[in-house]
Amino acid sequence: MKKLMLALSTIIITITSAQAQFSMSGEVNARSEFRNGFKKPMTESLDPAFFTEQRTRLYANYKADEYEVNIALQDIRMWGADGIVDKTYGGSFGISEAWARYYMTNKVSVKFGRQIISYDNQRMFGGLEWAMQGLRHDAALFMYEDSLGLKVHAGIAYNQNPVTGAEPVRLTGTYYPSFTGNGPYHATGNYKHMEFAYLNKKYEKGSLSAYLINDARQYGLEDSVANRQTYGLMTMRKVGDIKLNGEFFYQGGKIALSDLSAYMFSVSATLTTSATPLTIGYDHLSGQDVESGKNTTFAPLFGTNHAFYGFMDYFYVGNGNSNSGLQDLYLKTKFKIGKGAILGHFHHFLTASTIYEADGITEASASLGTELDIVYVTPLGKVGTFKLGYSQMFASDSMDIIKNTAESNSLNNWAWAQLIIKPKFL
């Protein structure tokens, strides 16, 4: 009898496993930071900051032949936000992801819910996993993907914010926060609605991606909505031991009542050697042309900007740069050391438009400063990772101008240590 029950159990498990797969995993991620000039130069009146922030997640995924469901719960907290004996709760607990995907065929599917939208190098769409909260969209995606390397996605999202829970609920707009230094179109708040199309084709020695994005922002009354369009191309080509990358994006449409005409481009080359990859590149994001009657400042949309414009987040990460745009000359490399590796990034930043001294007449230098980033990464067993980072910003007087930090300190640095454990429960 026992042998029969064991055999039946084995058959049931085998059949179930063949038709569906369930997995459950977790993440405990804590990062301690010493900030002394992070995001903008330190002024003499400020003291450095030190804190530890933690992200805890529980992931559950169920995949069958015709559908897939993914749910991720997360808690974000600063150590010390709750008292050691306290009934109040200072953390942020909620849904990181909650989506379902239905496969109409093995090539065509639809995915809807709260989700990460991430493409290519995450320049325009990324998960922003460096930030503890991440970046998520409440959206529906229609997806075509085949085995020949062609991927075509179309997405749509529409946001509302109910004022009360009474029926009928009165729905008002999801307003875009107008930060003093960032302007009302810095990509940190919700859009009213967003539509996009994405195409990617992979070749034997390269790839090509095309983007068409429309995001609508409210700027006044409930019916005051401005639509901004972003068009882009990204290409990669391998030539021997060298990988060449090129990107170009143009933005048009409206920002509030102003016409928009802005652009960005990026070129880079990566040489792979036996010792290390070596990348040299240049990014250019247009700033405001004072002689133009249009808004000419390019705004990155939903990408992981932390990965591109210096780890100290001086640009396009929740802080403004006086609409001066950006030029970034960079050199990046990576060395293996034992089981780990050291990343080294060098950036020299310049404005992409003219800026002026305090008198408003004298042109200031375009050079903003130089940043050096060093990160050590090593695995801890099979489920852990340890990271240790240090960054130094050598800011110029022009950096003080665009950041409005008069009489800043000459020494601006940032150090951090991060421990990540990602166990697989099932």
Image (cartoon, grey):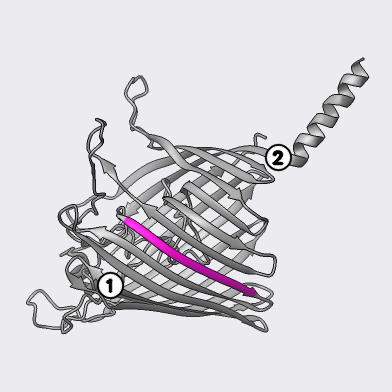
Quarter-of-image position of residue 325? bottom left
x, y percentage for residue 97? 48, 43
**Tag 1: amino acid:** Gly
Q: How many marks?
A: 2
Q: Is residue 119 visible?
A: yes
Q: Residue at x 40, y 74 (%)?
A: 231
Give the main secondary structure, helix, strand or loop, of the magenta stretch: strand
x, y percentage for residue 252? 30, 75
Q: Residue at x 26, y 49 (%)?
A: 174
Quarter-of-image position of residue 390? bottom left
Q: Residue at x 60, y 67 (%)?
A: 335
Q: Which mark is residue 20?
A: 2
Give the residue number, with chain letter if any, for mark 1. Answer: 253
Q: CA distance from mark 1 to mark 2?
A: 46 Å
Assign the N terminus to one quadrant of the image: top right
Classify 348 as above or below 13: below
**Tag 2: amino acid:** Ala
Q: Nearer the viewer, residue 126 or 211?
A: 211
- Looking at the rendered structure, the secondary structure element under dot 2 is strand
Q: Which residues are magenta?
A: 193-202
Q: Residue at x 62, y 38 (%)?
A: 423
Left or right side of 359 for 342: right
Q: Is residue 284 visible?
A: no
Left or right side of 267 for 413: left
Q: Is 359 contained in the magenta span? A: no
